[in-house]
Image (spheres, rainbow, N blue to C red):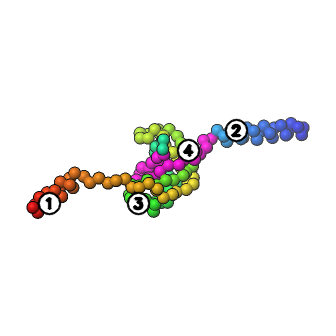
Amino acid sequence: MKKSFILITLSLILFSCKSENNNKESDLIRGEFILIDDAAVLKGNDFIYGVVINKLTHELAKKVKPLQREEYDMVPVVVKGIIKPNPDQGWEEIVEIKEIIGVSAPTSELPTKIKSSESQENSNIHLNKEN
């Protein structure tokens, strides 16, 4: 009786562990994050994911905001999330953030801004009027 009880108990433990492993586990993701209006993106060296907008996404956006140098500056983050196919139009895959691991200040320089030709034309017109 005692042996059968131990055998049943071990079987239950073994099967319960297997069912837990079938659930999708969170992946550690390092990339740059931005939230604009109702769209969020997480971009790495070899991937771009849309981000499911939820409570953690808004929390991450609050942590990122003070580190942005410009409105559209992407900030390096490390998160745990579940990557899944996107059923909607847009990115092929989306990530649902499950945990925020860290946020750091951007290290690269801001992109070079190029003035539009319209503003250059206006300055040329202004110079021509002076002459």
Q: Residue 112 appears at what percent x and percent y? A: 34, 53
Residue found 41% across the figure and 55% down from its top: 109
CA separation, marks 3 and 2? 46 Å
Q: Which residues are magenta?
A: 23-44
Q: Are marks 2 and 1 in contact (CB under 8 Å)?
A: no
Disc 2 or 1, which lies upstream in sequence? 2
Give the labeled residue for mark 4. Answer: 82
Tell me the kind of residue under disc 2: Lys
Q: Residue at x 44, y 50 (%)?
A: 40
Whichever of callouts 1 and 4 sits on the residue coming sooner in the sequence is 4
Identify the residue under disc 2.
Answer: 18
Kindly identify the amino acid type of the residue bearing the numbered disc 3.
Arg
Residue beneath label 3, please? 69
Q: Residues within 10 Å of mark 4 (few under 14, many from 20)?
A: some
Q: Earlier in the sequence, mark 3 or mark 2?
A: 2
Callout 2 crowding tier (Cα within 10 Å): few <14, some 14–19, many ≥20: few
In the rendered structure, which disc, 3 or 1, sits on the residue that comes first in sequence? 3
The kind of secondary structure the magenta stretch mainly shows is strand
Q: Secondary structure at mark 4?
A: strand
Q: Residue furthest right?
A: 1
Q: Which residue is mark 1?
A: 127
Residue found at x 41% / y 51%: 38
Q: Nearer the viewer, mark 3 or mark 1?
A: 1
Contact, CB < 8 Å: mark 3 with mark 2?
no
Q: Amino acid at mark 4?
A: Ile
Residue 69 versus residue 88 in the image, above or below: below
What residue occupies the far front of the structure in this picture? 131
Under tag 3, what secondary structure?
loop
